């Protein structure tokens, strides 16, 4: 099994207060969610998760934000937090915490709306930070194309590096192929994964990455 464990970091810049703050917030919300009685946990997710059918009817629009901080399992949480930890700090270091906050939340909302557009009849709550993190990843590949992703081959305990544009390009291709495959399926048939939230978030991130790159001259930023 191969998975990312780090990247080349920006030297200096703004401290990644929100990047790590969001990580702690997500863990805290998940711990609270799991401390609830079993029946209450389901109601909690129903209340604060983003349900595409309701969003399409203009109901509970606030869940486009609250759903970003909910997760369905420890594996779901840990995977998202790993990607948040790897990719978010460089962007916040360049654009600052205030701009990163707006970008992250809007990325999550755009991702949620993309899922609604492609699956408007679903009554299954969508939860997870993956749409917002996909936006972070989209911006990252534009802002730091020369960055390297540190990969771990866990069976042999081997560390190696690959260019960020290859890692993120393959990731986006996988999401796109999966999204096209599940078009027209029910949420149950699709396995409950919001592929179009990933795609929509990543495309939003690409657009914002182009803006950030031109505004903050990321080509001059040193990585180490």
Image (tube, grey):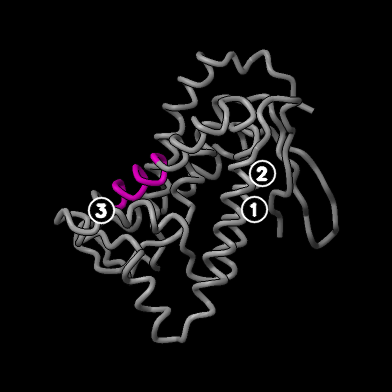
User: Looking at the image, is 121 positioned above or below residue 86?
Assistant: below
From the viewer's side, name the closer residue of 167 and 37. 37
Outermost residue on the right side: it is 157
- The secondary element bearing badge 3 is classed as loop
171 left or right of 65 in image: right
**Image: magenta residue range:** 106-115
Left or right side of 160 for 130: left
- Residue 1, percent from left and from top: 71, 60
Q: Find disc 3 in the rendering and name its residue.
A: 61
- Disc with the residue nearer the chain's start (3 vs 2): 3
Q: Position of residue 100 (x, y in %)?
A: 51, 34
Q: Is residue 110 magenta?
A: yes
Secondary structure, mark 1, is helix
Q: Which residue is rendered at x = 62% and y = 35% of the image?
A: 166
Please give the residue where the numbered disc 2 appears in the rendered image: 86
Q: Main secondary structure of the magenta part?
A: helix
- Whether residue 149 appears in magenta in the rendering, the answer is no
Disc 1 designates what residue? 82
Q: Nearer the viewer, residue 23 or 53?
A: 23
Whole-angstrom CA distance, mark 1 to mark 2, is 6 Å
């Amino acid at each position: 099994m191969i998975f990312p464990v780090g990247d080349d970091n920006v030297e200096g810049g703004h401290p990644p207060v929100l990047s790590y703050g969001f990580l702690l917030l997500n863990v805290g919300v998940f711990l609270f969610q799991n401390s609830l009685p079993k029946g209450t946990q389901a109601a909690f997710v129903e209340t604060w998760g983003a349900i595409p059918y309701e969003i399409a009817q203009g109901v509970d629009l606030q869940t486009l934000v609250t759903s970003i901080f909910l997760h369905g399992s420890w594996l779901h949480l840990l995977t998202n937090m790993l990607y948040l930890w790897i990719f978010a700090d460089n962007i916040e270091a360049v654009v600052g915490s205030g701009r990163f906050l707006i970008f992250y939340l809007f990325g999550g909302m755009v991702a949620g709306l993309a899922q609604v557009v492609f699956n408007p009849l679903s009554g299954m709550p969508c939860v997870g930070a993956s749409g917002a993190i996909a936006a972070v990843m989209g911006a990252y590949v534009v802002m730091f194309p020369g960055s390297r992703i540190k990969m771990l081959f866990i069976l042999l305990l081997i560390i190696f590096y690959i260019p960020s544009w290859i890692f993120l390009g393959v990731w986006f291709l996988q999401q796109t192929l999966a999204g096209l495959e599940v078009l027209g399926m029910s949420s149950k048939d699709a396995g409950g994964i919001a592929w179009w939230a990933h795609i929509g978030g990543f495309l939003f991130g690409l657009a914002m990455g182009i803006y950030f790159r031109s505004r903050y001259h990321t080509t001059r930023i040193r990585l180490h």
